[in-house]
Image: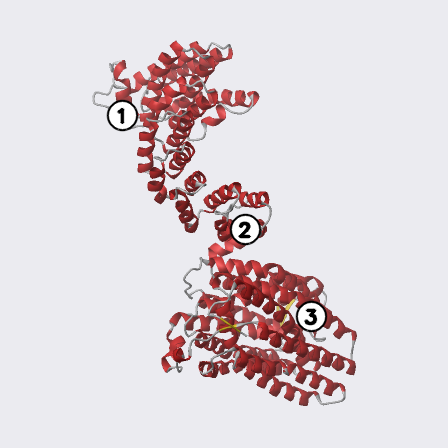
Amino acid sequence: MTATRQLSQTQLNRSMAVSIASGASGTLWVIVGSPQPIFNVFVSNAMSGGSAFLGLLVGILSFAAIFQIPSIFIYSRLRRKKAFWIVTSTIHRLNGFVLAGVAFSVARGGVPSRGLEFILYGMTASWIMTNISASGWWSWMAEIIPDKIRAFFFGRRSSISNIVNIGWFFLVSVVLDAVSGSALFYTYALIFAIGGLGGLADILLHVLIPELSPPASDELQELSVKDFLEPLKNRNFVGLCLSIGVALFSINVSGPFLAPYITATDAVGAPNTWLGIMFVISQLLWILLSPAWGMVMDRFGRKPVVMIGLLFTLSWIGYLFLNHANYTFILPVIALTGGALAPAFWDGTNQLMLSLTPEKNRLSFVAWYWAAIGVISGGGSIFGGILDSRLRDVRLQLAPGFTLRGLQIVILVSLAMIAFSLVVLSRIRESRGKPVGYVISLVTNPGVFRTFLNIGTIGRTTESFRVARALRSIEGLTSNLALEDVLSRLEDPDSDVRDEAARALGRIGSPEAFDALVRQLVDPQSTIRSAAARALGRIGDRRALPFLIQAMSDPSEDLRDACLYALGEVGGENAADQLLSVFQKIDSERLVATGAAAASKLGVLEAAWEIVPRMHETRNPVLRNQLAIALGNLLGKPGEFYQYITGNDSQRDARRIRLFSDAQRNLPNIIRAPHLFPAGFERLKAEFSADIRNVRNFLEVEKCQEALDLCERIAHRLVSLLLPAGTPDELYVEYAVFVDVRLAIWWWFLQETRKLVEFDPDHSMITTDVFVAIYFLSTFRTPLRPSPPGAGPGVEP
C-alpha cells in the first residue's frame, strides 16, 4: 500500500488511527516482554537472576543499539522501509513466545539458570533484530505525520496505549500475587504468550499504514561516506546524543532494580499488586497529561519539556525512606510524581530527536541517535547491577531511625548523575524553543488547566457562543498555549467569535499575535479592524504606532475610536503628537472622550487646553465625567480621580470627605517648609487648611459657586507665593510653567472655569470642577528647582 509524496487528510487520519490501535496492541508485549517491572521481577526474583544478571541483560539490550548503524546502509539500498521493518519486527516480537517457553519449562521442573541463558540469548537476538530496523519506523512516521502535530499525536497515542497498559499491568500483578510454586511459572508462561500475540498484532496492523512513494529510480543514490558520517559532524546532534545517553545511563543505574526491591521479601516486601497500584496511578496521570505535554512541546519546544520531564526521578527520593511499614503511603506519592512528569521525558526525547534531525538523510541521523544512546546508556544498568550486588548487605545509619540500604545508596548515585545530565542537556540548541524557566512557570501556573479546557472548546466545531465564551477566558501566562487555536478563529463565520479571537490575541501578546492583529488592522476587507486596534493597544508594542496612525484617517468612527484608545495604551512621542493633533480636530463626542482618556494616559498636558472647554460645553453627563476624569489624570495620578465621581452616593461621599483630608495633609508638600517659607510656614498651613475646610462646608450646603470662588482664591494666593514677587496675574500661566506645568494648568483651569460657569451655572458641573481643584491640592508637590529670573525670596534659588 503506497501513497504519493504527501498523504491526503483522509489517509493521514486513517493512518494515525491505525497507529494508535497498533500502539495499544503492542503495549501487551512491551509491559511483559521488555525490561519493565513485570519482566524485571520475573528475572531478578522468580528466576533468582539477581541484580547483577538483570543489570547485565539490560546493558546488553542497550548495547544492541549499535546495530542501528548497519541499518543506515540497509535502508539506503531499499526503495521502501515498510516491508523490511515489518519482517524484522515480527521476528523481534516472537521473543514473547521464547519467554513463555522458558517459564513453561521451569514450571515443568526445568533449571532456572538454564532458562536465564535462553532469556539472555533470545532477547539479545531479538533486540538485534529490532535495532537493525527501528530507525526505518521513526523515519517512516516522521515522513507521514506533519511536524506541527507530531508531538501532540504521539502524546495522544501514548495516552491511549496507556489505557490498555493500566488494565493489563494491574491484572498481571494481581494474578501473580494469587499464585505460587509451579503455578506461578505457568502463569508467567500464559502472560508472556498473550504479550507475544499482542506484539505480533501491533506489527501486522502497520500493513494498513501507507508509506510515501519513493522518489523515481534515477533519483536514488548510493549512501555516500559523507552522508553516513554527516550526523557525527553536527555538533548539536552529537550533543543531543550525549546528553540523552547520559540521562538514560543515570536512570539505568537504579531504574531496573526498583521493582525487584519493592517486591523482594528481604527488602520492602510489598505484594506484586502494589506494582499494579503504582502503575495505575502513574499511567492514569500519563493518559491525562501526555497530550498536554505534546501540545506544550509543539508550541514551546521539546528541550525544555524534556528537561522538566527528567525531574520525574526526584520521586525516587521517596525510596530513601521506604520500608515495610510505610510503603502504602510512600509508593502512591512516588507514582503520582513520576506519572505527572515522566511522559514529558519519555515522549519528549523522541520528539526532540526528530525535531533536530534534517528531513534529508534523516534515517542516518535517527540510526546514529539510537545507536549512541543505546551504547552510552547500556553501561548504566551493568554498573548499577554490580553496585547493587556489592552493596546488598551494606547498612549506613545517617541518623537515629534513618538507615540507607545498598540500593538506596545506588539511587543517590543515580540522582547525582541525573543532575549532571541536566547540565549537559541544557546546552542543546533548539531553534524555536522557549527558555526552560518560562515553560516551568507556564506548566506550574494553576490557570494551565483552564487553558487546556478552553483549547478543547476552541478547537472543536461547536456552538459559536461556547467558542466565544472560551475565547473570553483566554488570558494570563498560559494563554500562549492557545495561540494557534485562537488564530484559527480570526476567520470564523461568526462575528462575535472573530471579535473575541482578536481580543484574546491582545491578551496573549506574543509576536505571532501581534503580527496577526496588524494584518487584520491594515486589511480594508477585515471585519475586526476595531477589535484588532484595541488588542494592539493592549499589547503595547510601539511597532504598531504607524499602523494605528494610518488607520486614524479611515472614515469609520468605530475604527478611529479604537485607534485613539490604542494610541493611549501604546504611548511614545509619536503617539502623543498624533493624539494632540487629532484631538484638536475632533467633533464627535465619542472620539473626544476616547481621545481625552488616551491623552491623559500619555500625560499629554497640552490636551487640557481642549478638555476644559469641551467639558463645560457638552450636555452629555457621561462625556462630562469622562473629560473630568481625563483632566484629573493629567493633574494627578492616572486612574485615581475616577473614584471621586463614580460609585453609589454613600461610597462617593465617603471618598470625597477623604479627598479634602488628603488635601489638608498634603499642604507641607506644597508649601515645602522650611525650604520655601521658613518664617511663615505654620501660619500659611493653617490658613490654607481653613480655606480647604470652608470649600467643603460650602459644598455641604450646596453653595457650589462660593466653593468654586474660594478654590480660585486659594489658587491665586498659592501661585502668587510660588512665583517671583510682583508677577502680574496675566503672566501667571507663563511663569508657573517654570515651577511645574501642572501648576500652570491648574491655575488656568480655574480661571477658565470661572468664566465658563458665568454663562451656565450648572451646579453639578461646578461641583465636579471643585473636586478637580481639590484633587490637585491632594497630589501636588512643589518642586525644589530654580525659578524664573527675579524670583522672590519665597522661592529657593
What type is the residue that disc 1 sits on? Answer: Phe
Counting residues from the start of the chain, the first of labels 2 and 3 encountered is: 3
Count of residue discs? 3
For the residue carrying disc 3, how many other residues have a C-alpha within 10 Å: few (<14), some (14-19), or many (20+)?
Answer: many
What type is the residue that disc 3 sits on? Answer: Phe
What's the mark number on residue 445?
2
Quick one: SS at disc 1? helix
Where does residue 143 sit, x and y in percent of width and height?
A: 48, 70
Where does residue 208 sit, x and y in percent of width and height?
A: 59, 73
In the image, taking residue 193 as reference, residue 314 lies left or right, namely left
Q: Is residue 117 above or below residue 299?
A: below
Counting residues from the start of the chain, the first of labels 1 and 3 encountered is: 3
Q: Which residue is mark 1?
A: 738
Quick one: SS at disc 3? helix
Q: Are marks 1 and 3 in contact (CB under 8 Å)?
A: no
In the image, taking residue 496 as reference, residue 585 lies left or right, namely left
